[in-house]
Image (cartoon, rainbow, N blue to C red):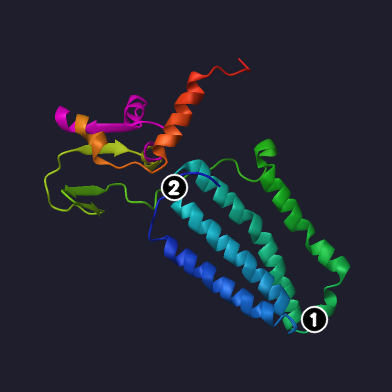
Amino acid sequence: MRGAYAYTPYLWPMLASAVFSLALGIYAWRRRGVPGALPFAIMELFAMLWSLGAAFELAAVEDGTKIFWFKFQATLILPTTTAELCFALQYTRLGRLLTRRNLALLSILPVINIILILTHEVHHELWLGFTIAGNVHPKCYWLVLNPGDVSVCIKHPGFDIDVVVSADLAAFYEVWMGRITFTQAMQDQRLELDAAPSLVRAFPKWFALSQVARVVRAVANSGSSQKSPFH
């Protein structure tokens, strides 16, 4: 899923969980001849994917991206539960119950659930809406700029503040990528500066853009200058 992402320390537990699940899945797959090993490996595969989805949800900046990864995790809940049931039956020597017919019956609900999630925008039967409760990313950052050195702080470093910037990370990401300029972000009120006029004018020069920003900007300008054949 394309979108803006930002680092947060909350990623580490999810990534550690994904790696642990992957290791268990590989271990079980190599011993899939043991009763219960194959469904256990499948269960750990789903668990790994769920952990990765949770990590992407935590790192996502935009609400739409967070909702996408939330839905991605929701598609894995019933398949994981089904694999867990198969593991329990095989491990307790009740694998004879897992006939093709019974496996087909067990797969009905997970398949229906996935279809409902993929078509949710049509029927809205699963969720009435989404509310993003809070943000795991710090609300404030402090940049300490010195010649040849830049420090990013999540706590007040104790220096006087020269420039106060109010913006969302998605706006900064688009500026850094070259999709929009600082001026456009300010005109759209996605970025606001509170400082002396001289510092406001100098602010855009303080940050290096991505290596592809010029190319992205050139393509955007050429596209906007050409009249679409569908108009």
Q: Is residue 165 above or below residue 85?
A: above
Disc 1 is placed on an element classified as loop
Residue type, mark 2 in image? Ala
Of callouts 2 and 1, which one flags the residue occurring earlier in the amino acid sequence? 1
Residue appearing at x 46%, y 42% in the figure: 62
Residue appearing at x 74%, y 73% in the figure: 86
Q: Is residue 144 above or below residue 76?
A: above
Q: Which residue is mark 2?
A: 133
Q: Is residue 180 left or right of residue 200?
A: right
Label ID, residue 94:
1
Quadrant including the C terminus: top right
Q: Where are the magenta residues, as a range?
A: 174-200
Q: Is residue 124 left or right of residue 140?
A: right
**Which of the 4 image quadrants contains residue 191?**
top left
- The reply to whether the C-beta atoms of the residues labelled 2 and 1 are less than 8 Å apart is no
Label ID, residue 43:
none
Q: Position of residue 59 (x, y in %)?
A: 44, 53
